[in-house]
Amino acid sequence: MPGATLTIDDLTRPVLNPSQRQILEQLDGLTVDLNPAALIDEAIAKTGLNDFGPADFRSRLDAYAAAADADGGNTNLNRLILRNRILRLLSQRLLLTDLLRRYPEIHDIEIERPIIVVGLPRSGTTHLVNLIAADSRRRALPYWESQEPFTLRGEGPDVNGVDPRFARSVFEHESAMVMTPLVQAMHDRFPQAIEEEVELLDLDFASYVLEWHARVPQWRDFYLALDQDAHYAYLRTTLKALTFLRGPRQWVLKSPQHCEQLGPLMRTFPDATVAFTHRDPVAVIQSAITMLAYGDRIRRREIDPAGLAEYWIGRVEQLLRACVRDREMVAADQSLDIPFHQLNGNEMTILETLYAQNGTELTTEARTAFQRYLDENPRGKHGRLRYDLQGHFGRSPEDIRSRFGFYFDRFDVREEG
């Protein structure tokens, strides 16, 4: 049975528990250096490697680190998280470059007929990609692997056969549950959950994902000006490397970022089958900013509900305007528009259409796996949140929805609430 309805009474004026306070206080006096040169040196020392691949990444790394450093509202905990993220990205980039050097045949691998889920955050993309990944013939990107796609040299499974990358992901997830225990009800990134490939794009310091970790409008503007064809090609190479290590199977991918990058996406994966999910932007925005505000109790020195709402209303509008503008770049026989109100309970019909377009047989084994996933993962499994858009953020549904007439005119989207 689905979990209970949850209310966060202290969303905008958080009351921290003793563990949260202790960790934040312990780190408060720490100096966290985001200097790119120092992080590069540390990544080289950590991996024993020094070739990052194409050198043009450096200007993007500088912009990435500068944007994170310019956000003065971060707690030291979040600055440390951001520092560790950049170090991890640099280390993984070194490991990928080394793998490609040792096994050049990776470049000959084809990424054929992937299914790619494209839609706003909180619009059913996570549900759909995890469902499709239940088909054992599909290759997907679990969260633990998205964080460390490639192993450090000399590292291997422990005596119980557990990958150390997975073990680290389990530890980090358990720590996150201590700091933000209600995150499961919003978007539980447990180690086995299927994650977005923008985490791989970030190895090239070229995705929008930093926007979810800090207030970085200067990074948003820098990212939007990039030639994404080059960076999606880097993503394709990374997928080839992962296929080489743990394949071959057809991929299932997903990211909201693709809404505003449909040209690069389809030029990179021209034979992809694309599943577009569509939901009332009000429902999307209130869910996303509530999740972000809840996490901000440990990430930020102060909660800024009005600023959070304004930023993400504008950001979602950018994503959707680009999607409406470019939707016809994806051929009708390679794509399907899926309204959110038709997703829950109608998954098998949707999968039949997608698999037919993809030229993949929907076997009895796959159908059984899909049904098992649906039975074990009902909507609201970990509980549902009660939202208060007006009380928490000072915005009415009507005010927000008035900016999205262009989207309602183009797709079959129903107002929620």
Image (cartoon, rainbow, N blue to C red):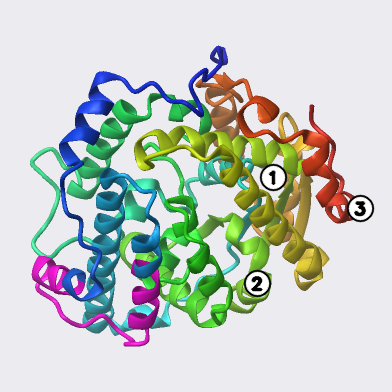
Q: Quadrant of the N terminus?
A: top right
Please, which residue is most extreme toward the bottom here? Answer: 55
- Magenta stretch holds residue 61: yes
Q: Three-letter amino acid code at disc 1?
A: Leu
Which circle's residue, 2 or 3, is located before the other in the chain?
Answer: 2
Q: Quadrant of the C terminus?
A: top right
Query: Residue shown at 37%/54% (left/top)?
Result: 72
Q: Compared with residue 287, is residue 361 higher up or lower down, i.e. above or below?
A: below
Front position in the image: 46 or 42: 42
Give x and y (percent) for residue 320. Answer: 73, 58
Regarding residue 355, the answer to whether it shows in the image is no
Task: Give the quarter of the image for residue 333.
Answer: bottom right
Q: Secondary structure at mark 1?
A: helix
Which circle's residue, 1 or 3, is located before the other in the chain?
Answer: 1
Provide the residue span drawn in magenta. Answer: 40-65
Q: Distance between the Cα atoms at labels 1 and 2?
A: 18 Å
Q: Three-letter amino acid code at disc 2?
A: Asp
Q: Main secondary structure of the magenta part?
A: helix
Give x and y (percent) for residue 235. Answer: 45, 71
Front position in the image: 104 or 48: 48
Between disc 1 and disc 3, the foreground one is: 3
Label placed on residue 409 = 3
Figure disc tally: 3
Query: Residue shown at 38%/36% (left/top)?
Result: 190
Label placed on residue 271 = 2
Judged left or right of residue 360, residue 220 is left
Q: Which residue matches tag 1?
A: 351
Q: Distance between the Cα atoms at labels 2 and 3?
A: 28 Å
